[in-house]
Image: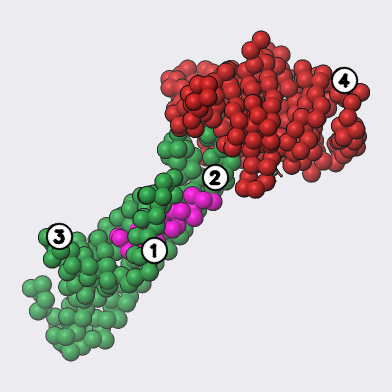
Amino acid sequence: MKPIVRFDKVTKSFGDTVILRDFDFELTPGERVVLMGPSGSGKSTVLRILMTLEDIQDGVVYIDDEPLWHEGVGNNLKPASDKHLRKMRGNVGMVFQHFNLFPNMTVLRNIIEAPMKVLKLSRKEAEARADELLARVGMSDKREAYPNSLSGGQKQRVAIARAMAMRPKLLLFDEPTSALDPEMVGDVLQVIKDLAAEHDLTMLIVTHEMGFARDVADRVCFFCDGQILEQGAPSKIFTDPAEDRTRQFLRMVLHEEPASEAS
Amino acid sequence: MLFGMSWDLTNDWTFAWSIIPMLLIGMKITIIATIFGFLIAMTLGLVFALARSAPTRFISWPVGFVIEFVRDTPLLIQLFFIFYVLPSSTGITLPALEAGILALGVQYSAYCSEVYRAGLQAVPNGQWEAARALNLSTWQTYRDIVIPQAIPRIIPALGNYLVSIIKDTPILSAITVMEVLHVANIIGDRTYRYMVPITMVGILFLILTLISAGFVKFIEKRLPRAGIAVK
Ligand SMILES: Nc1ncnc2c1ncn2[C@@H]1O[C@H](COP(=O)(O)OP(=O)(O)OP(=O)(O)O)[C@@H](O)[C@H]1O
Ligand SMILES: [Mg+2]
């Protein structure tokens, strides 16, 4: 199958610091991939490049065979225009670690804002879409509430509904549960699992929740210093990793999990 | 005699009483200058603030220069520029009050633009990123997300400038505007009694600034902390 996402020798740097060098990576449509790895290794950067929140310095990123950060074909690529970026961005959605809900809008308004303004849905259509999603994430009763009155877990469920309302092909999750109190984590992971079961959405998830990864991921990538050191089915990576660094990291995550989730 | 009215010099109290109508005429000019000057300042200030953070330097740098220039020069210079220099160099002639309002508006728009800029920058970057991820345009993001959240932070600072614009209106007398202090001065010149009219003007200013400050507090109280709700 043709990949939905392809990084082709991508280089990303901040000033003199190179984060990704000649990075290659692919996702096939419908695949659920979990990215794990030490802090600062560049996991968020990979997601942010796909969401067009960070540009790239070299190489090409393709979404559905179309360059994301470039326009044109073959060797005649030039930097993408705003128009091109807007078109490409329509394929992708993102769920952030800190939710980033709009505090000046009700839950409902958070969800219908972009479908109305960007997809030009009527208010009725947008609300129908929002209500269906709110029901699915178990937040129907908070339709008219403002984000500040919600718990972290509730906020994140609304944020997931908001991203889904744009019907992306590719949904990115950047540590969706690491800012949550431990007792909220389960609900949010369950919502993501349900979405994964019902949709043929492609998902790229940065998380250190191993149980969740085992349930949901087709593939786990262990990310280290801007490279994928090792990847494979969760059962393989979690039980019998080939690399020492992977083993070390997994041991650390297992031991720290309760503590780091609470922080 | 002033504005066709005369004063009663029997004693200080009758004098004070008799000049109230004249001072109120001046007060009306002061209030008009304040309100319209402030409206211009708030509007032009927002334009300046957005232009200054425009992505192209061809816009942001010249605008930044204009703002700095206006901020760092006395109001009197803006006033003389608009009232005396503009007519001779461009042929645009403004009546004194209009020129004064424009000068106040331009001067305070430079201050307001800084208030807006600080308020807009205080909105977390995550809001921009979420809006970008939802494919909202820059303009839509400003209008529905960033500006509504910036307003509660902006209002108190704007309120301070409202009070200070009131206190700057007497400068307009330099280009013959009959604002309230100018009126009091003329009464003093003609009666050789300054104490009563000047004191009364002080009290009038005090009342005006207290009312304005109360008005700003009233608005502040009604603003939800999260920002203006978008329905
Ligand atoms: N805007 C920026 N300017 C400079 N350096 C940055 C910027 N954003 C990220 N970095 C650096 O890039 C590197 C990779 O960051 P990234 O956020 O992708 O890591 P991560 O794997 O997501 O880490 P974490 O697990 O802590 O979230 C880090 O060293 C970080 O300091
Ligand atoms: Mg990260």
| In the foreground, A59 or B38 | A59
Residue B58 percent across, percent down from the top left: 37, 49
Residue B32 left/right relative to A30: left
Q: Give the colouring mode of the picture.
A: by chain
Instruction: Tell me the residue that label 2 is attached to.
Output: B226
Q: CA distance from mark 3 to mark 4?
A: 80 Å
Residue B155 percent across, percent down from the top left: 45, 55
Read off the magenta span. Answer: B105-122
Q: What is the number of callouts on the image?
A: 4
Instruction: Tell me the residue that label 4 is attached to.
Output: A236
| In the foreground, B81 or A227 | A227
Q: Residue at x 44, y 58 (%)?
A: B114
Residue A33 percent across, percent down from the top left: 73, 22
Q: Badge 4 local density, few (<14 within 10 Å), some, or many (20+)?
A: few
Q: Are marks 3 and 1 in contact (CB under 8 Å)?
A: no
Q: Are marks 2 and 3 in contact (CB under 8 Å)?
A: no
Q: Residue at x 30, y 70 (%)?
A: B75
Q: Are marks 3 and 4 in contact (CB under 8 Å)?
A: no
Q: Is residue B189 above or below residue B178?
A: below
Q: Is residue B189 above or below residue B39?
A: below
Chain ID for red: A
Query: In which chain is the residue bearing label 4?
Result: A
Which circle's residue, 3 or 1, is located before the other in the chain? 1
The hue used for chain B is green
Residue A87 percent across, percent down from the top left: 48, 24
